[in-house]
């Protein structure tokens, strides 16, 4: 029986055929230098390129590489969750497969962990190879989340982090849908610290977070950890009521004085109705987002479905029943079963 790993590295994979070989080589070099038993968990999130074949070959070459194949695409955050569910190490590191997060930083994360910290998150001090729009929107997103959410989520941090086994177990008990892992990690508490690093350019392939997905991810983060969008409705309604109250004497004075600036005609009424309707539709949208998340929780569907697991020294696969977790976080991409 293989030795229980001390370090587990989890990497979600979606169409990363150009990165997997180098990811394995760099991660194995870093972890071998620690002298500790380790495992690399690759979660195939419905890839339809050569990623499944490459992952299978890596497992055959090195049994320390464990592979989890989803039945279809279930989304990045659910893939990360699956990796944590299957991880056996005392320390679990989350890292993206695109090599923007350098595996060499894992040594710094481990150093802080050995000092007694239970969550060590990597702080993006610099972001290479990204457009000004991506950097600006990311900066705005992190600062918005920091100000309106109910937990202290560190600025400029992604999912690249190390977590102690105790933290992983706490997160595994949280089977909520529309997951925001970095927010959940902050919510559970424990001793936390950050390590600055320079985020590199993507080694190969294309980003899996276009603008549409970034907006959806931001909605998951905001609605999952803040009631602020619901609370602003009362302030908006009070503001509109104040405008209406102030408008009554203004219109009355203008009418009595015979001023040419009178609010008359259907055009004015139509503009006011359209303005009020837009406010109402916006608030209905906000409420709908929260109601949709209630619906996701009530259905109690699993977060992911595992089709195949490759682990151990043999080459036979095992079918696993996933932990009771929904497909609400699934990407809207072509769905294929590897």
Image (cartoon, rainbow, N blue to C red):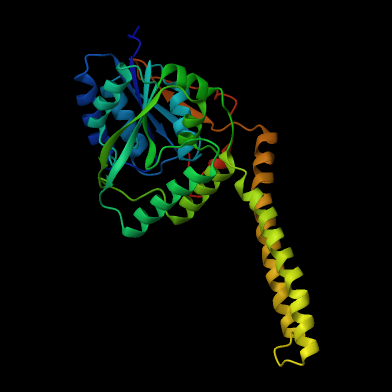
Eyeballing the image, is 112 above or below 265?
A: above
Eyeballing the image, is 138 above or below 321?
A: below
x, y percent for residue 247: 74, 74
Front position in the image: 154 or 255: 255
What residue appears at the point 27 percent right and 39 percent down from the top-left corner?
99
Eyeballing the image, is 216 above or below 246?
A: above
x, y percent for residue 283: 68, 56
Task: Using the rendered view, name the quadrant where residue 277 is placed.
Answer: bottom right
Q: Residue lying at the far top in this picture: please name it.
A: 1
Check the picture and name the quadrant holding the N terminus. Answer: top left
x, y percent for residue 9: 34, 26
Front position in the image: 274 or 296: 274
Q: Is residue 185 left or right of residue 160?
A: right
What residue appears at the point 45 percent right and 39 percent down from the top-left corner?
76
Task: Using the rendered view, name the quadrant where residue 292 is placed.
Answer: top right
Front position in the image: 40 or 60: 40
Front position in the image: 221 or 43: 221
What residue appears at the point 47 percent right and 34 percent down from the top-left corner?
181
For residue 97, say whether it is visible.
Answer: no
Check the picture and name the quadrant holding the C terminus. Answer: top left
What residue appears at the point 23 percent right and 35 percent down from the top-left corner?
22
x, y percent for residue 69: 44, 31
| Number of marks drawn | 0
For residue 35, say whether it is visible.
Answer: yes
């Amino acid at each position: 029986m293989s030795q229980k790993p001390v370090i587990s590295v989890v990497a979600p994979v979606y169409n990363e055929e150009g990165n997997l070989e180098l990811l394995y080589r760099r991660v194995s070099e870093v972890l071998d230098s620690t002298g500790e038993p380790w495992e690399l968990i690759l979660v195939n999130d419905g890839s339809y390129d050569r990623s499944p074949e490459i992952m299978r070959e890596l497992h055959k070459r090195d049994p320390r590489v464990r592979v989890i194949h989803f039945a279809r695409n279930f989304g990045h955050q659910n893939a990360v969750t699956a990796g944590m569910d299957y991880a056996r190490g005392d320390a679990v590191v989350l890292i993206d497969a695109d090599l923007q997060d350098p595996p060499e930083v894992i040594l710094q994360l481990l150093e802080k962990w050995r000092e007694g910290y239970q969550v060590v998150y990597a702080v993006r001090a610099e972001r290479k190879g990204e457009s000004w729009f991506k950097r600006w929107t990311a900066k705005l997103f992190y600062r918005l989340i920091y100000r309106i959410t109910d937990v202290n989520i560190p600025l400029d941090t992604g999912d690249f982090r190390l977590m102690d086994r105790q933290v992983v177990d706490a997160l595994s008990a949280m089977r909520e849908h529309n997951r925001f892992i970095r927010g959940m990690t902050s919510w559970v508490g424990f001793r936390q610290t950050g390590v600055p690093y320079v985020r590199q350019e993507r080694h190969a392939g294309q980003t899996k977070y276009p603008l549409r997905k970034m907006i959806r991810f931001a909605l998951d983060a905001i609605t999952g950890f803040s009631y602020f969008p619901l609370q602003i409705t009362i302030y908006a309604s009070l503001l509109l009521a104040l405008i209406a109250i102030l408008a009554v004497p203004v219109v009355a004075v203008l009418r009595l004085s015979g001023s040419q600036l009178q609010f008359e005609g259907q055009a004015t009424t139509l503009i006011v109705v359209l303005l009020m309707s837009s406010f109402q539709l916006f608030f209905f949208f906000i409420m709908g987002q929260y109601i949709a998340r209630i619906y996701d929780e009530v259905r109690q569907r699993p977060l992911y479905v595992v089709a195949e697991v490759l682990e151990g020294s043999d080459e036979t696969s095992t079918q696993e029943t996933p932990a009771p977790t929904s497909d609400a976080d699934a990407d809207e991409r072509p769905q294929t079963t590897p």
